[in-house]
Image (cartoon, helix red, strand yellow):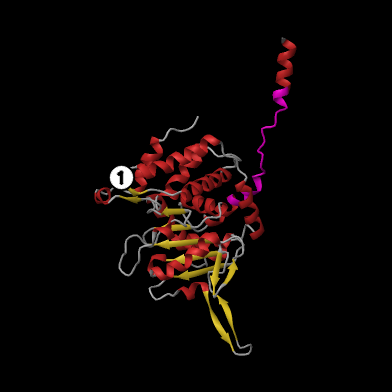
Amino acid sequence: MENNFETNNEQNENVNFESRLNLQPLQENVQKVKAEIAKVIVGQNKMIDQLLVAVLSNGHVLLEGVPGVAKTISAKLLAKTLSLDFSRIQFTPDLMPSDIIGTSVFDLSKSTFEFKKGPIFSNFVLIDEINRAPAKTQAALFEVMEERQITADGTTYVLEKPFLVIATQNPIEQEGTYRLPEAQLDRFLFKINIEYPNLAEEIHIIQKENELQSRDKMSAIATIISQSHIIEFQELVKQILIEQNLIEYIAKIVLNTRENAFLYLGASPRASIAILNAAKGFAALRGRDFVTPDDIKDAAIPVLQHRVVVTPEREMEGITSIEIIKQIVDSVEIPR
């Protein structure tokens, strides 16, 4: 018996508990990116984590918050840390679809029309105040955000990988704005609400601004991750394991949004896939090669809140989609 016990101990000591995937380079680069952004941005750690998960999951992000809470600067800082072709589009009421995707111009020397690519032909696109443009212009983003390609004059142009859109919008000011259609909202992996800082963060923001007044904030930010590494990390995230019972857990959460009496419109299967991809992104960010229920919980609200519609009665009572999603997640039994 003693010999068997010793043999079992020797076998246990030889068991390899190392991660199936080498996530160390990914984690090291992510920490460096966070450190660079922290040179300018105070707090907002949750938002930065969600932005990084979106990059790793190859998903688009809608940032919503009142003016002055660092929506645009956060996106610009993130873009600076990534070695990607960057473009910024300021949406206005007079913006036309051709101003985004491009237009055909007649070339006199060749007597032919030549397609001039618009600013959407980039790896990292920041759309400022996306709800300022009318539906016709917003619709120009449908194909490119979902299929990463643009069709113009019968020709399809495939965009270079990776392709990420970060859009901002102001939830307070409604004059001169247009509501984003549900079909467009559904193409954003995350909707992230940016809140006001607390007192300690506010003091830190003022102190940091006072220190950086004589320097260009963007020039202090270093480029950390190359384009090839981003693509490599995105492929790595796809290989993260998720057990069957957790897949069922995701399906039950999404199904509950369709059966909830407080919701007029529930989430579609695209939302289920989005939670799956985002949960893998959160797992990678935390150095794990497998998904846990906590990863799914962290993904649920930013993935679902813009994909469901609260009934008018509950909306009048001040109940938000975030509160309803929290109740749904809490009500679904966690797999053991």
- Between residues 240 and 46, which one lies in front from this camera angle? 240
Work out whether 59 lies above or below 115: above
Work out whether 111 lies above or below 187: below
Q: Please provide percent x and percent y for residue 121.
A: 56, 69
- The residue at the point 70 percent across, 32 percent down is 16
- The residue at the point 47 percent across, 41 percent down is 251
- Tell me, yes or no, if residue 70 can be seen here: no
Please give left or right for residue 1 compared with residue 75 in the image.
right
Please give left or right for residue 175 compared with residue 138 in the image.
left
Q: Secondary structure at mark 1?
A: loop
Residue 270 part of the magenta-drawn span = no
- Tell me, yes or no, if residue 171 can be seen here: yes
- Between residues 204 and 266, which one lies in front from this camera angle? 266
Work out whether 24 lies above or below 147: above
Q: Please provide percent x and percent y for residue 155.
A: 58, 72
Query: Where's the N terminus, which quadrant?
Result: top right
- Between residues 151 and 296, which one lies in front from this camera angle? 151
Where does label 1 land, which residue? 262
- Which kind of residue does numbered mark 1 sit on? Phe
Count of picture labels: 1
- The residue at the point 62 percent across, 56 percent down is 230
Q: Which residues are magenta?
A: 11-30
Q: Residues within 10 Å of mark 1 (few under 14, many from 20)?
A: many
Residue farthest to the top, as pictured: 1
- Between residues 179 and 288, which one lies in front from this camera angle? 179
